[in-house]
Structure formats: structure tokens, C-alpha cells
């Protein structure tokens, strides 16, 4: 991932969060066996200064938090995020090789106001040993199947592994089919989601969409002849739409030294992207958004997007919520 430049970016980020409310994250009452409680605080965030965020008609901001972590915390660099249990529990991965769990905190109006119960454990290799090398531990995407199994996609050493039940991951993951494509070292399978027919969909950060089952992967959209650049919008996360078919994706672009943007869009079964639902850019709240989760909510879909701070003091771990009314995704942003 390309870290955001320090200096001026840090000043802008501090400016848009100066009035936030900070709270301690309530620890897990008793961490699950094999897991370690993680310390953090949260700071409420909005969409920032005017001229930054743009939302399509029918899309509503539903709260946001910054997860503030100690410098040496293993919870930095969260790279994907999916909902589990009652849709308040979540599971995440870091690109350093840790699996993370926690719970969302919503207020009486259903707005996101915090997280609680953060805990983590080291991901393991197929021989059951903990991952120790960045080459093996660069986890970028995850999905939870309808049967409750946890799939994780990795880059550098490109692969997808099945860790078994998300509530009790196996120490010895099994190999899962992934696209037969020569992914660049640090631009791999960023988006991964279960499909509506029991398989899994994969997107490459440099382009390309594939639908996979255990026997083979089928190319839905071929990768471009010229790989996408950092200055292009690239898909960094994906989740299955809870109703109506298709998927939601989050995309990111970076143009040095300061232009960091993210946007949320719909993807159809053929891999085509719909209009932009939400766009985040300076001087509003923005960062290196890589994770997305979707759940049915009040006549539409609740989306959560998560940023990867790259363990960089100039970046933040942000979790933002948006509500999308049914079919409003077809409208997109108005010019």
C-alpha cells in the first residue's frame, strides 16, 4: 500500500478531527481462547470540512469513529472488515498477519458511535505455525461464507486460505482456489466476497474480476493490458449486497502529495460498476480505505468502510457508516 505523505496531511487530518469526542474502548469481558485483548480508544468523526464528502441522493451518513491505537499495537494496518453474528460483531485482518475481532457500538438512533471488545490472534500457516514473515502475512481481504467459514486472501505470497469456522478458526488453514493470474508483488487480491450462488468473487487491485468455485475460477472482467496506477481508482474492498444481487465495492486513489480519495460504488454480476454512491476527499474526512461490509438495514443497506493506517502516524484507522436506500444506488452523484 502507498502511505500518505506526512507533514501537511497530518495537519489537515488533525484539523478535521479537532472537536471529536474520545472514549475508551470497552475490553472483551473474557477474550476467547487463543485471543489477546487489544487496547484502544475511539474518537467520533464526521465527514469533515465542506467541499470534501459528496453523497448521492438516498445515501445518508450514519456515524463514524477513529480507532486510536498505541504505537506498538498489532491492530494497526486493518485491511478488510466483515460483519458476523448479529451484524454488530465484526472480523478484520491486518496486512501484518493478525486476525482481529470486535463489536460495533450503535446509539439509540442506530448510528455508529464506537467499537468494543477488540481482540486479536496471529494467523497461522498450513502447518499450524504462526506466520512470522511479511511475505506470508500480508492479508488483504476476507469473507465469511454462508456456512460460517473464514476465507482470507493474501498478497506478496498470493493465495486464498480457508481458516474454517469464523468463531473458532482452525490452526491449519486449507488452500482455496484463486485466479490463475500473475498478480504484482504488492497489488494482489484486495477485494473478496462470497457470491450469491455459493462461490466467491475476487478483484485485483490492478484490475480484473473473477468468480471462483472449488474446481476453477472464471474470468468475469479481464485485467487491463496496462495495470492501473495509484492515481487511478482501484478496488480495495468488496462485499455481497444483502438484497437485490450484486456487490458493493470501495475504491481508493492517491495522487502525491496530498490528494487521497475514496469512493463507494455498486458492482453488478457482470463486473460493471455503477454510479458513485459516496466520495470522500480533502478537506473532508478521508484516508486509505480498504475494507467494506454490507448488511440489510431499514429498507436498504447499511455500509461500513474501514481505512488501513499503514502503521503511519500521519494516517488514521477510520470506520464510517452509510445508509443506502433500496435502488438509490442507480442514481449516483449528481454533477
Image (cartoon, helix red, strand yellow):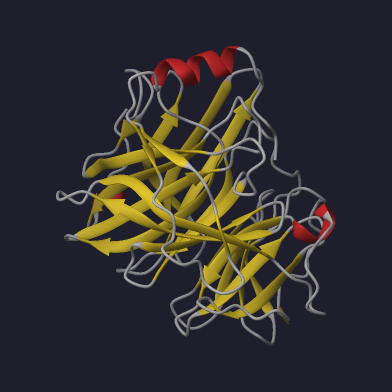
Residue lying at 36% horizontally and 69% vertically, measured from the top left: 245
**On the image, which quarter does residue 181 sit in?**
bottom right
Residue 37 vs 143, above or below: the answer is above
Residue 299 x/y as whole percent: 17, 61
Residue 326 vs 335, above or below: the answer is below
Residue lying at 82% horizontally and 51% vertically, measured from the top left: 185
**On the image, which quarter does residue 255 sit in?**
top right
Residue 148 vs 240, above or below: the answer is below
> Viewer-proximal residue, 312 or 121?
121
Residue lying at 34% horizontally and 68% vertically, measured from the top left: 242
- Quadrant of the snapshot with the N terminus: top right
- Quadrant of the snapshot with the C terminus: top left
Marks counted in the figure total: 0
Residue lying at 62% horizontally and 82% vertically, measured from the top left: 213
Residue 270 x/y as whole percent: 50, 65
**On the image, which quarter does residue 44 sit in?**
top left
Q: Is residue 268 left or right of residue 9?
A: left
Residue 287 x/y as whole percent: 52, 32
> Viewer-proximal residue, 122 or 165?
122
> Viewer-proximal residue, 170 or 46?
170
Q: Is residue 148 left or right of residue 51?
A: right
Amino acid at each position: 500500500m502507498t502511505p500518505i505523505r506526512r507533514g501537511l496531511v497530518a495537519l489537515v487530518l488533525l484539523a478535521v478531527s479537532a472537536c471529536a469526542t474520545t472514549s475508551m474502548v470497552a475490553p472483551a469481558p473474557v477474550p476467547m481462547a487463543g485471543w489477546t485483548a487489544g487496547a484502544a480508544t475511539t474518537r467520533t468523526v464526521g465527514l469533515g470540512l465542506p467541499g470534501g464528502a459528496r453523497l448521492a441522493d438516498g445515501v445518508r451518513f450514519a456515524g463514524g469513529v477513529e480507532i486510536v491505537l498505541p504505537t506498538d499495537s498489532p491492530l494497526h494496518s486493518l485491511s478488510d472488515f466483515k460483519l458476523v453474528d448479529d451484524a454488530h460483531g465484526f472480523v478484520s485482518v491486518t496486512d501484518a498477519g493478525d486476525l482481529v475481532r470486535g463489536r460495533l457500538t450503535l446509539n439509540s438512533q442506530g448510528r455508529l458511535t464506537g467499537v468494543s471488545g477488540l481482540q486479536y490472534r496471529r494467523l497461522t500457516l498450513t502447518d499450524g505455525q504462526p506466520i512470522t514473515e511479511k511475505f506470508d502475512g500480508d492479508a488483504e481481504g476476507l469473507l465469511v461464507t454462508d456456512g460460517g467459514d473464514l476465507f482470507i486472501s493474501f498478497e506478496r505470497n498470493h493465495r486464498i486460505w480457508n481458516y474454517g469456522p469464523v468463531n473458532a478458526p482452525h490452526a491449519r488453514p486449507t488452500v482455496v482456489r484463486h485466479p490463475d493470474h500473475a498478480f504484482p508483488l504488492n497489488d494482489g487480491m484486495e477485494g473478496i466476497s462470497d457470491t450469491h450462488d455459493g462461490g466467491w468473487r475476487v478483484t485485483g487491485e490492478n484490475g480484473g474480476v473473477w468468480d471462483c468455485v472449488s474446481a476453477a475460477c472464471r474470468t468475469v472482467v479481464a485485467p487491463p493490458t496496462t495495470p492501473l496506477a495509484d492515481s487511478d481508482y482501484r478496488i480495495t474492498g468488496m462485499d455481497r449486497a444483502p438484497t437485490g444481487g450484486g456487490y458493493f465495492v470501495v475504491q481508493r486513489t492517491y495522487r502525491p502529495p496530498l490528494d487521497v480519495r475514496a469512493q463507494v460504488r455498486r458492482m453488478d454480476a457482470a463486473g460493471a460498476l455503477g454510479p458513485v454512491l459516496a466520495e470522500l476527499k480533502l478537506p473532508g474526512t478521508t484516508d486509505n480505505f480498504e475494507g467494506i461490509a454490507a448488511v440489510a438495514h431499514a429498507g436498504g443497506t447499511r455500509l461500513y468502510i474501514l481505512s488501513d493506517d499503514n502503521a503511519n502516524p500521519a494516517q488514521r484507522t477510520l470506520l464510517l457508516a452509510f445508509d443506502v436506500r433500496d435502488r438509490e444506488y442507480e442514481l449516483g452523484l449528481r454533477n
